[in-house]
Amino acid sequence: MSNPSASHRPSPEGTSPSAFLKGLKCRECGRLYDLAAIHVCDFCFGPLEVDYDYEAIRRVLTRDAIQKGPNSLWRYKHLLPVVNEPTIGLHAGMTPLLKADRLGKALGLKRLYIKNDTVNHPTLSFKDRVVAVAINRARELGFKTVACASTGNLANSVSAHAASAGMNCFVFIPHDLEAGKILGNLIYKPTVVAVKGNYDDVNRLCSEIGAEYPWAFVNINIRPYYAEGSKSMAFETAEQLGWRIPDQVVVPIASGSLLTKIWKGFQEFSSLGIVDAHPGLKVNGAQASGCSPVYQAFMAGRTQFVPVKPKTIAKSLAIGNPADGYYSLDVVGKSHGQVEAATDPEIVEGMVLLAETEGVFAETAGGVTVACLRKLAKKGAIRPDDLTVAYITGNGLKTMEALTGYLPEPVGIDPTLASFRKIVNPS
Amino acid sequence: MSVLIRIPTPLRPLTNGQNEVQETGGNVREILDKLTAHYPGIGERILDEKGDVRRFINIYVNEEDIRFREGVQTALKEGDELSIIPAIAGGSR
């Protein structure tokens, strides 16, 4: 156990802390730890977070330095927890920030943007950000095998990155995932373990497996590093908006990690002077009604959530026992944001609305975000002139089952002009 | 009731390195009381100042989170298995 008053010790794995990383620190009790493959405080079981040397970062990080960096999340490497130059996942991030005028018009919002991670590289979800960071850090720590507990997107990304890094890979998923997400693992030849249970069962099991096997579980023992990759969503948003923080963000909540890290990213940028501080930023959360522990706690005015058994088509958000649920409520509360929830039909409507107005085909989680954005706009929680960013985190081609029965059939005709005129009749 | 308790890695120094121990009790609270009595130091690690299970610890009986049952009042039967697992794991969004 580390003493909170002690300085960080050198890492036993032989990777000395970089100029910008001091160690790990318990978010609850402040105890300090080495930059090792650990994720909870030995004493209070609180989450460990990376402890940066912000003064050192401040001396080198400027807008100009960022703009001269690669066209990926690695342009923000000073604020990402890797010691050496990254060698894997070099193309994740820097996805488009779309000015969503047509969707905005439909919702009564004049300054709406979509952060479009449906086209992230290489596996079409925001998970490519966190995995890029996790795999590099796992290699620095000497691991040969990577693993994860996943609702699908994470497994896809870990499988792809492990393949490109030549590492062994085990991914653990609930047995009832969408076909596209299962295939999206198998193609990379990892060992795919389908667990007869929901994500929370998978997660608990992986915590126990991780205690026995010397693997880098990206969202367990590598979690302090992995989770930091999500900050790049905020960094990119600020840069792409012309170095400013928006008035409102809408973020889907599964574990809650993304929401808390987007908040942290904006705070880091403003405290380092990269952008002006914006105390008015409101962070809003979006959940599926069929798995809404954070929404329910928010509505009841509680600071802690009660776990639920998920039942929703938004399988990537189906975490009934969210690890960062407590901190998500904290961020939403202190930013004066709100949490909304969307039913399964509303989720599909959100997917369709986003597609038909902006040409973006999002997975079910994106439908949740758009549906909740709509509710927040309708009730006036987001005003028409608010500079608003909605985070679309995964690609619709992975969750096509959700649309079964919701879309019209193609118009069938004979291969003749007459048939076209008669049946399609585009007058 | 004799119950098997799985001890997480951070607490094993307090159980002489054992990853599993046996205790007897009729519910989760009684088991935790026995555990803290037999292994000094483990109580302050699992329970907060009010005696409640710490926020970042989840307890499972036979793989089911006790918050889906009666919390620390969850009744136990002979042969049940109790797991103490850090809450901070996972993260899909």
Image (spheres, rainbow, N blue to C red):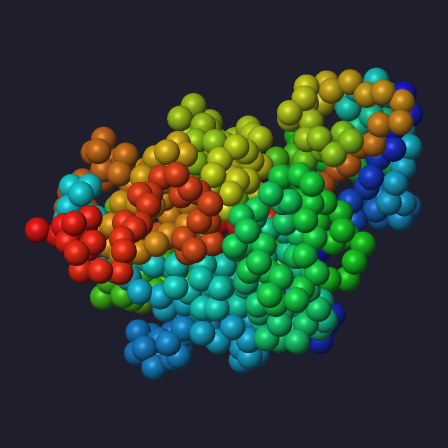
Q: Say left or right for A100 vs A219.
A: left
Give the residue furthest to the left: A427
Q: Quadrant of residue A88?
A: bottom right
Instruction: Please name the residue shown 72% across and 18% down the image.
Output: B73
A313 or A268, nearer to the observer: A313
Identify whether B44 is placed above or below A116: above
Q: Say left or right for A336 vs B41.
A: left
Q: Say left or right for B41 vs A231.
A: right
Identify whether A148 is placed above or below A385: below
Image position, residue A117 (x, y; %):
39, 60
B77 or A164, nearer to the observer: A164
Image position, residue A176 (x, y; %):
60, 43
Instruction: Please name the residue shown 63% across and 49% down the image.
Output: A173
Q: Quadrant of residue A37?
A: bottom right
Q: Is residue A50 visible?
A: no
Instruction: Please name the residue shown 68% across and 31% down the image.
Output: B65
Image position, residue A370 (x, y; %):
31, 44
Instruction: Please name the residue shown 64% across and 25% down the image.
Output: B68
Identify whether A401 is placed above or below A214: above
Image position, residue A151 (x, y; %):
56, 48
Q: Is residue B75 visible?
A: yes
State the count of labels. Answer: 0
A55 or A96, nearer to the observer: A96
A360 or A401, nearer to the observer: A401
